[in-house]
Amino acid sequence: MKSSWQPTLLAFLLTVAGCATTAKHQVVLTGDIMADAPNAIANGPPRDRVLWEYRLAAAAMRRGQFDLAKRNLDDALLTLGGIYGKDADAKKARGYFHVEARKTFIGEPYERSMAYVYRGILYWMDGEPDNARACFRSAEFEDGDAENHEYAGDWVLPEYLDGLATTKLHGDGSDAFKRAQAIAKGVTLPPYLPNANALFFIEFGPGPTKFATGHYGEELRFRTAPSPVTSAELKVDALQIPIAPTDDVSFQATTRGGRVMDHILGNKAVFKSTTDTIGNVALIGGLTTAAMSRDRTTQEVGLGIALAGLVSKVVSGATTPAADTRSWDNLPRYLSFVSLPLPLGQHVATIQFHDSAGQVLPNLTKTITINITTTDRDKVVFVSDTSLTPQTL
Amino acid sequence: MKLFLAKISTPICGAALAVLVAGCASSGVKNPSGVSVTHMNADEQGFVAGTGVESQDLVMVADKMSRSILAIPQIASAPTPPTIVLNPVDNQTRFPINKDIFLTRIRAQLNSKAMGKVMFLARNQMQALEQERNLKRQGAVTASADPGVQEFKGADYFLTGSLQGLSTRTTKGTSDYILYDFHLIDARSSVIVWEDSAEIKKQGLEDAAYR
């Protein structure tokens, strides 16, 4: 009988070559988010699209490019709103042989909440406080399913702004204020000023990023660099207003608790470890049996066991429990807010950022010229410690 | 030994082939090549759906409201067609929406089905209309009637509404209930002469990979 293994092996190798992943959606990054993000969105893997839209939106807001931020957040939030039901990539991400990062990125709850917070700020800028309020409610909602219920829905600023928007829309915002105050724990929130027409949203400090631990990188963890900025001060006209953090994004990231996906990754890690162990035992045992025996049948059995062990090792090698560490890595650490009444006309606002000793970090000071031309809508000012300066709004 | 290898090579290679094909082919992926654009009716739910406000909700709500408005005596039995101004809808849900779209559709339905029983005032165009009238008054453009006469109509009624929501999120899924409420307010007396509502509840659960 002619041997059949050569053509079989040839077919095998051809198939492997055919199935080899060709380089698709490769994007070369320059380090400039304003160039990299549009490139990645247009040419990168679709599963990373939302991530790049988030990053671009945050960068655009700090440059005063609010229309660009809006477009990207709207597209990202469309994807976020449609994640219900069957998702082939998500299903594969749960499988043994695909990484979690195969799924479409929509972010962990703190990232989704921040997308809504930013979009809410932009709606308010456009004179739509009710749509802004909707976004703040969604921001709180995204945090509504924490493993530890103590930390569910515990963002302060979205709750506070929910009530402020309601007050400005001639409704009763007291319930939202009470919820915000209860969450704030020990910090006295300023009462709502219905006539405050200038709203300042301030953010500072570097936000959390993700990394993986565990034998196979199956455990998702968060790290946050120490913030050089711990407070700020707003000066406008004759007013000097100290600004303390209202929300800590790192706190939100680390207190959400375990994910369902963490359990799945844990199971994958156990499977990987088990099949690896079985493979080792079978390989060693089978080869030893085959080598030590002079009986042909025993030798064949030993080789069969060794081959099964090899298959188990291959399966173990193909199992991928690694956690998805894709991060919205240009988020801020701290969020804060000031509202005050300003008359019509031009005003120059200076925002200074302080370190933990209360010293001004002069290289971070921002100057914004604010033109208040109408009493029909609030003037919304967004300032980050990484914003471009000066700006005119 | 050669015979043994020959015996097992085919099944082993076949099995490995099957594993590799299963691992790298797009089998099991629905619509790997995408789906061409297809026309749908606005009142149909597409295959892309969330728990918020969607076109089929808008169509159902607007249709219900327009039929309801036409039945009230203030509209049906008015000696002259009453004039209505649209006031912005108040969105109290957690979904940012294009609020104008509801009133736009209700107005379109009423204009097409009311046979002139109601008239809507284009208050959002007042700036352009006043500019045109001023040009006529200045003689810069022609006028078919005396531009000095006040002809802009006042509103008999205001049509407005609100969207209110209740949302729940647990490990079992997300649930969103929205109450669409619309009312017609007498501009002279502030009496609500008509009100109707529709309510829609949706729920969904995302893949475990996102929880």
Image (cartoon, rainbow, N blue to C red):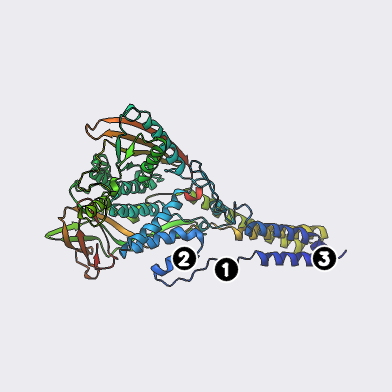
Q: Amino acid at mark 2?
A: Ala
SS under mark 3: helix
Mark sitting earlier along the chain (2/1): 1
Which quadrant is home to the C terminus of chain A? bottom left
The picture quadrant where one finds residue B61 is top left
| Image x and y of residue B19, in percent | 67, 57
Left or right position of A136 against A233: right
| Image x and y of residue B178, in percent | 39, 38
Q: Amino acid at mark 3?
A: Lys
Q: Are marks 2 and 1 in contact (CB under 8 Å)?
A: no
Question: Image point 35% across, 60% down: which residue?
Answer: A67
Q: Residues within 10 Å of mark 2 (few under 14, many from 20)?
A: many
Mark 2 vs mark 3: in front = 2
- Residue A40 — which label? 2
What distance separates the C-alpha of mark 2 from that of mark 1? 15 Å
Do badges 3 and 1 share one subunit? no
Q: Which residue is mark 3?
A: B2
Do badges 2 and 1 share one subunit? yes
SS under mark 1: loop
Observer-nearest of A175 and A254: A175
Q: Which residue is mark 1?
A: A23
Is residue A221 visible in this depiction of the protein?
yes
